[in-house]
């Protein structure tokens, strides 16, 4: 099937197993996560967090947590910190608990707004 087509198109093509592809993806993820952690720890500015919660067409809920910040060269960055399944209920209490779990470790850098303290925002 697919391997024969790739061999036909390019003799130098080396087929990858699904385990090799999985390990390669996990290695890249680990490297990028370390890079992001290092860059966020060296920031001189604050971090603003946004979250997005949605439900798929089959009823599964998902939540993402994104960090927005400005680096020392005044470039705006947006990085996804976490993406996870969000089981029901999708009420304020459940969302608070999940965001608290996702955002732990960066509370000292998070900018607070509207008079809400950081401790109240993330705890």
Image (tube, helix red, strand yellow):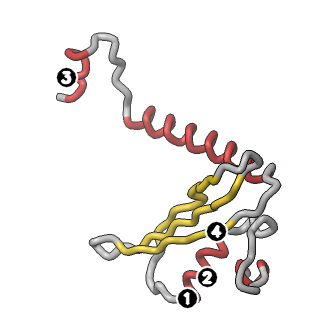
Q: Is residue 109 left or right of residue 88?
A: right
Looking at the image, residue 83 lies above or below residue 28:
below
Which class describes the residues within 10 Å of circle 2: few (<14), some (14-19), or many (20+)?
some
> According to the image, label 2 marks what residue?
96
Q: How many marks?
A: 4
> According to the image, label 3 marks what residue?
5
Measured Cα–Cα span from mark 4 to mark 3: 46 Å
Asked if labels 1 and 2 touch by Cβ distance under 8 angstroms, the answer is: yes
Measured Cα–Cα span from mark 2 to mark 1: 6 Å
In x, y percent, where is residue 8?
20, 15
In x, y percent, where is residue 90?
47, 84
Residue pictured at 59% horizontal, 56% vertical = 78
- Please identify, in this view, whether the residue under mark 1 or under mark 4 is nearer the observer: 4
Looking at the image, residue 61 lies above or below residue 11:
below
Quadrant (top left/top right/bottom left/bottom right) for the N terminus: top left
> According to the image, label 4 marks what residue?
49
Residue pictured at 76% horizontal, 86% vertical = 115
Asked if labels 3 and 4 touch by Cβ distance under 8 angstroms, the answer is: no
Asked if labels 3 and 2 touch by Cβ distance under 8 angstroms, the answer is: no
Determine the secondary structure under disc 3.
helix
In x, y percent, where is residue 7?
24, 17
Asked if labels 4 and 1 touch by Cβ distance under 8 angstroms, the answer is: no
Measured Cα–Cα span from mark 2 to mark 3: 50 Å
> According to the image, label 1 marks what residue?
92
Looking at the image, residue 99 lies above or below residue 43:
below
Pick whichever of labels 1 and 3 is earlier in the sequence. 3
Quadrant (top left/top right/bottom left/bottom right) for the C terminus: bottom right
* Front-lying residue, 74 or 46: 74
In the picture as drawn, the residue positioned furthest to the front comes out as 74
């Amino acid at each position: 099937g697919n391997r024969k087509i790739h061999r036909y198109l390019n003799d130098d093509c080396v087929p990858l197993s699904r385990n090799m592809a999985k390990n390669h993806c996990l290695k890249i993820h680990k490297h990028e996560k370390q890079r992001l952690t290092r860059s966020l720890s060296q920031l001189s500015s604050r971090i603003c967090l946004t979250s997005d919660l949605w439900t798929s067409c089959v009823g599964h809920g998902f939540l993402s947590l994104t960090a927005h910040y400005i680096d020392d060269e005044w470039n705006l960055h947006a990085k996804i910190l976490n993406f996870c399944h969000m089981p029901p209920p999708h009420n304020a209490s459940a969302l608070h608990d999940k965001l608290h779990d996702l955002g732990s470790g960066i509370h000292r850098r998070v900018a607070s707004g509207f008079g809400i303290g950081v401790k109240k925002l993330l705890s």
